[in-house]
Image (spheres, rainbow, N blue to C red):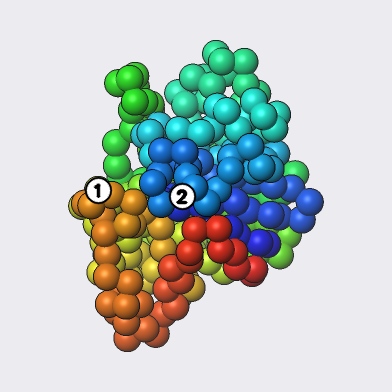
Amino acid sequence: MKITFYGQNALGLKIGNVDVLVDPFITGNDLAKDKIDIKSLKADFILLTHAHQDHILDAEEIAKNTGAVIVANFEVANHYEEKGIEVHPMNHGGSWDFEFGKVKYVNAIHTSSFPDGKYGGQPGGFVIESEHKNIYIAGDTALTMDMKLIPMKTNLDLAVLPIGDNFTMGIDDAIVASDFVECDKVLGCHYDTFGYIEIDHEEAKKKFYEKGKDLMLLEIGESIEL
């Protein structure tokens, strides 16, 4: 599995021959818009954790460019289906076997509304079990005891956790979250995009290191392989 970071919560996953895009917010991100051309992005599926603009902004255009299927909660999926986009609706606790692996939609503590104020359902995260690697994409969330349910069924190879604080977990809570999901390999997201969520990179890595954990903070466009 190859994972590329596009800023904020936007990720590209290459799982076998399938391209999966998560929460594409690029053209509105000053840190990413001059580095990533959304017209060049490949996507067979687009996973959306919730309806906030900094997670969905480019989803419609990319889906129409690529023919990707949007996977999201029922309300978000309906929103895009009305725009003529193929969707797969999900809801909390449910799972589905896609061609790239099994996806489960799990709880997140946050809010969810579209930029125009339209109701976006309840936010969530995704646990993806592929043929060789398993990852947890938390989305925007507070620390929650529900995270302890994940390792009861899935042994994770990577946890993608928000670390910017203010709107989501900060560094200290993300460390606890990695304990809850029993995964010491963490990819940080949802940081630096706005003034409210700027972090000290070295301090963040040091705090994880002191707990025996590996925090990866990728440059926009940078990739890792699991």
Where residue 130 appears, x then y in whole percent? 68, 56
Where residue 98 appears, x then y in whole percent? 70, 42
x 49%, y 19%: residue: 79
Question: What's the CA distance linking mark 2 and mark 1?
Answer: 20 Å
Quarter assignment of residue 134: bottom right
x 62%, y 30%: residue: 63
Q: Can the viewer see residue 69 in this picture? A: no
Where residue 42 appears, x then y in whole percent? 69, 43
Quarter assignment of residue 71: top right
x 52%, y 51%: residue: 35
Secondary structure found at label 2: loop
Mark before the other along the chain sequence, 2 or 1: 2
Nearer to us in this view, 159 or 151: 159
Amino acid type, callout 2: Ala
CB within 8 Å, label 2 to label 1: no
18 relative to 22 in the view: left or right: right
Amino acid type, callout 1: Phe
The residue that mark 2 highlights is 32
Total count of labels: 2
The residue that mark 1 highlights is 167
The local crowd at label 2, few if under 14, some if 14 to 19, many if 20 or more residues have their Cα within 10 Å, is: many
Mark sitting on residue 88: none
Position of residue 90 relative to residue 135, above or below, is above
